[in-house]
Each structure stands twice: as C-alpha cells, then as structure tokens.
Amino acid sequence: MESVLDKRPALKAVIDQVAEVTGYLWQKGWAERNGGNITVNITEYVDDEMAALPALAPAKQIGKVLPCLNGKYFYAKGTGKRMRDLARRPMQNGAIIRICPDCASYEIIADEPVMPTSELPSHLALQDYLLSTGSTYKATLHTHPIELVAMSHIKRFLRPDEMTRVLWSMIPETLAFAPLGIGIVPYTLPGSVELADATLEQIKYHDVVLWEKHGTVAVGTDIMDAFDQTDVLCKAANIYMCARAMGSEPEGMTDEAIREVQEVFHLPTTRPC
Ligand code: 13P
Ligand code: ZN
C-alpha cells in the first residue's frame, strides 16, 4: 500500500524516530496493551500534494477550541493501538490528522482511517500552548512509567514540589536535565477535557506532568527528547525505590548541593523556547 512517507524522507525520519521510541516504551514496561500515546507536529513536512489529500473519515470534534492549531498537521497514535505494534508499523497504528478551520475539529488524511488516541484533548491542548509561545517543541508523550506512577499513590509525593525535591536529590543529572521538575495533576478521568486543562496548567511550569495513579505527560523538541525527559525522572524514582527496598529512606543530596548545581550550571527556571 502507498504511504505518504514514500516520497517524503524527512517526514519518514520523524515517524521512524516515533517507532524507535515506542519500542523503548514497550521494553521499559511502560506500555502495557495500548497504554500511552504520542502526537508530533509534522506541519513543516506537508507539501501541496499532501495538503490536498481528502479526509478519510468525517471530521471529529476535539472537545476544545485551540486557536493556534488551524491548518496544522499531526501524527497521532491510534486509540487502542499497541506501542509495540506501532514500533513495527507506525502508519497502521497511528494516523496523520489535519486540524479544521474551526480549530475545534480534525480530519484524518493518511495513511488509513485510524482513529487518534483518546487522550487527543490533552495532546492538542499542549500543542496549541507550545505554538502560542513560539516554542520549537514538536512532540508530546503520555506513558505509564512504573516507578513514577507507584510514587503517585503515596500522599506525601502529591504535595506541591515534594516529588520534585525528592527526585532531584537522587542524582545531580535529574536536576540538570529536568530543571523545571515534575508537576502533579490530581486523579482525573482519562481522555477528559478536564484532564487536558489541568495538564496544560502544569506543563507551563514543569518538564513533565504526572497524572495521579495513571502516568506522565512530557513535551519535547522531538519525541526522543520527550522520552528522555520522562526517563530521567523515572530513573530518579527507581533509585529512590531501590534505596527504600534496602530498608532506609535515602539521604538525598542536600538542599545546598541542589542549589550549587542550579547555580554552577545556570539551570533555567522557565521553559526555554
Ligand atoms: P489510547 O489507546 O486511546 O491512546 O489510550 C491509552 C491511554 O494510555 C489512555 O490514557
Ligand atoms: Zn494512559
């Protein structure tokens, strides 16, 4: 079967990277069954021929009006699709969608009428925000990282900034590569507009957002970057849990040591564009 990727090597490279990352998600145990989802803004790769492609199914509502998304194109994982299948066949387990001029609905244009992820409201709300700030970030990743989800079941870590403080204190690299830390969204119905709105508020000030008792959402320049953001924080959570499994609350870097890393490495306190 013909694919829009056939004549577009630059677009194919982006989708190949998505496939590579979804393989990692499966290997890490973060992607049981259809767990997790991805969107990538691919508008820059859409030429006139691709823009003229007809809709493969009737337009569907997003559930939100997102003014910066008019005419934008995204690759999105299909709802119910498995990351491990997507790793081998990205265009049969995901689709390219175009946002309609009303900025409130979308249509699927390629390769097949695969319905996008149920978490589309959250992904597109973040994409809209990123565009509104002039950000170069293109990718959003929702996944189910075991250690971070486990920590979200413990009340102490849901207190503002407590999770970030503990994760930063496990290993200096966490602080260096996730300098904005992790934001918390109290448990909210998966796929809901309420979840999208709450996620948006947290991502403005954090590298990664943790959905209580569910998973994480990260944004990145590309999907590898969004994966790395999640991985760095999950590694710190794993170290915390290993120390606890040895029978003690880990000491953690001191607040002074954390401040020193922040100062010496001039770590940003707001999201760079
Ligand atoms: P989808 O299969 O609709 O992408 O849903 C997976 C998921 O993780 C929902 O939160
Ligand atoms: Zn999920």
Image (tube, grey):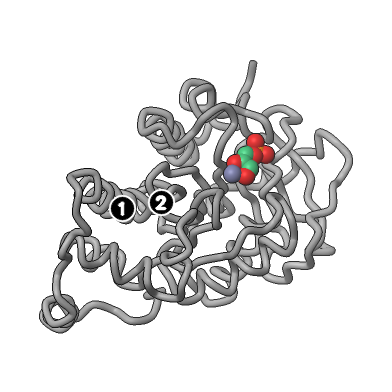
Q: Is residue 213 left or right of residue 102?
A: left
Q: Secondary structure at mark 1?
A: helix
Q: Is residue 118 above or below residue 160?
A: above
Q: Is residue 234 left or right of residue 208?
A: left
Which residue is at the front of the view, 69 or 126?
A: 126
Q: What amino acid is found at the position of numbered circle 1 in the picture?
A: Ala
- Tell me, for residue 63, which label it has, or none: none
Could you classify mark 1 by the number of other residues whose Cα lies within 10 Å: few (under 14), some (14-19), or many (20 or more)? many
Q: Secondary structure at mark 2?
A: helix
In the rendered image, residue 47, in percent from the top left (x then y), is placed at 61, 47
In the rendered image, residue 81, in percent from the top left (x then y), is placed at 62, 28
Q: Residue at x 53, y 77 (%)?
A: 133
Can residue 6 be seen in the rendering of this structure? no
- Tell me, for residue 237, which label it has, or none: 1
Q: What amino acid is found at the position of numbered circle 2 in the picture?
A: Leu
Q: Quadrant of the C terminus?
A: bottom left
Q: Is residue 125 above or below residue 58?
A: below
Which residue is at the front of the view, 229 or 222?
A: 229
